[in-house]
Every structure is written in structure tokens, then in C-alpha cells.
Amino acid sequence: MKLPAMHVMGANTIDTIEVNEEVMTDSSTLVIHQPKSNQRIGILGGTFNPPHLGHLMMAQQVGTQLELDEVWFMPTAKPPHVPGKTTIAASHRLKMVELAIADNPLFKLQSYEVNRGGKNYSVDTLRHFKENYPETDFYFIMGADSVKDLPTWYKPDELLQLVQIVGVNRPGFMVEQDKYPILWVDSPLVDLSSTEIRLRVYLDQSIRYQVPAVVEAYIQQQGLYAYPR
């Protein structure tokens, strides 16, 4: 069910189209956000299932090293590049990202792809942003593993015409990618995985210092990823 676009203030939340009722978070406040002219904005996409400290560190390093005005965290509705990959409800992932970035004014939650629903390709999303914000420079942030897979993405050549790809070096991952102009950024070596974090929760192991404390508390409160008891 679609609801009308909302104009409710929220310092770290961005919404650009009408809101899906089923993905709204309990306490999220949504705002129709337009970048200022000539802004430099980074976009970090992913399932964020859950968001962890590696995501935050990656975004912070890119944001500060490239002197970006904002870094948007953009959860996917349905991962287009990973066949068979499933995830929890978007409402939980949006809420966890909102909690994780709340104390950093550089970070914003971008719910565009979740609100659209279904399978979203990055090239289509970036085309939408460039059409609506033609004076904004966008930087699409990728981990080294995603950079390696870039040739298999949908319309990668067109994507490169819309946005500057920023690759973030990952622990133990070497990428030989000379086909596309990648802007590489070094980040502290923190080898965290959402998959491993979910497994730790399932096995009733600690995830302290792997996700923000507020995200850990939310996972526990909502019973996410836990073994059914």
C-alpha cells in the first residue's frame, strides 16, 4: 500500500518519493530532501542486514578523504546482483541504519530503493538522482569485492557515465581492475561480515564491538536472526 509523500522532519533521514506503508519504521521521521547545488554526495548501498562498524568506517573514510558533503546509506529492497539472496523485512533494516548513523551529521538514510520496492539496479537509481539533481556530484561507494564483480553488473558502462565509482580496499582482497576508472580509498582493516554477525546471533554469541550498541540492542529487542526457541 502506498502512502502520500511525507514532510516530517528527521535530521539523518532522506526520502525522495512516496512511502511504502509496510517499510515505515516505528519511530522514523521522513523528510523530502534535496541536495544543495554543487554538493558532493557519496552513496553506500547494500542490504545492511545488519549494518556494522565496517560500513560506518568505510563511509567515514570516504566522506572525509574525498571531502564529501554527505554520505547516503541506501538499503536495497531486493538485491539484484545476488541470485537467491534473501533478507529480513526492510522496515528492520531501515530502522537499524537509522539508529547506526543517528550521531553522525555526515550520514543520511536514503530510502529511495526500498520505497520503490522490487529489484532496483544501481544504474536506474543513479539515473533518477542525476535527472533530479543535475548539479550534484555523486560518488558510488563499493567494497573491493563489489568492484571485482562490476563487469557483471547491469549496464556498468552507463553507470560509470553517471557517477564516480569509489573503491574501498578490503582486508586480504586484491583487485586487478583496469577496465573502469576506479577512485581507490584506503580504510582501516576491519574484516566484518553481516553474514557472520547473523550467524553469531543465531549461535547466541556476542556481537559487541561489531555493530553499534544501539543496533545490538535493537536486534535483541526484536529477536532478529535468533534461533527459534
Image (spheres, rainbow, N blue to C red):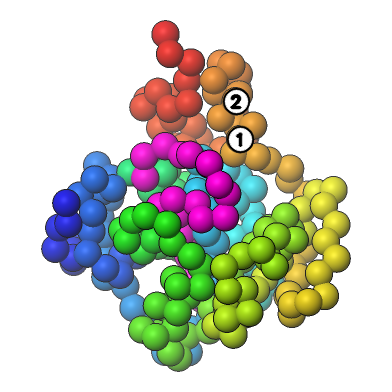
Going by the numbered disc 2, the residue's amino acid type is: Leu
Query: Vertical placement of 227 versus 122: above or below?
Result: above
Query: Vertical placement of 79 versus 151: above or below?
Result: above
Residue 178 position by quadrant = bottom right
Badge number at residue 199: 2
Q: Magenta part of the protein: which range?
A: 67-90
Horizontal side of residue 96 vs 165, given as left or right = left
Q: Position of residue 207 (x, y in %)?
A: 59, 28
Q: Position of residue 108 (x, y in %)?
A: 43, 62
Q: Is residue 101 among the parts visible in the rendering?
A: no
Chief SS of the magenta region: loop
Q: Position of residue 182 (x, y in %)?
A: 73, 75
- Residue depicted at 42% across the width and 57% down the height: 119
Residue 58 on the magenta segment: no
**Residue count near mark 1 (Cα–Cα under 10 Å), binned few <14, some 14–19, many ≥20:** few
Q: Are marks 1 and 2 in contact (CB under 8 Å)?
A: yes
Secondary structure under tag 1 reads helix
Horizontal side of residue 53 vs 118, given as left or right = right
Q: Which residue is mark 1?
A: 195
State how many labels appear: 2
Q: Position of residue 111 (x, y in %)?
A: 36, 59
Going by the numbered disc 1, the residue's amino acid type is: Thr
Badge number at residue 119: none
- Residue depicted at 59% across the width and 16% down the height: 203
Residue 197 position by quadrant = top right
Relative depth, front residue between 194 and 69: 194
Residue 93 position by quadrant = top left
Measured Cα–Cα span from mark 1 to mark 2: 6 Å
Secondary structure under tag 2 reads helix
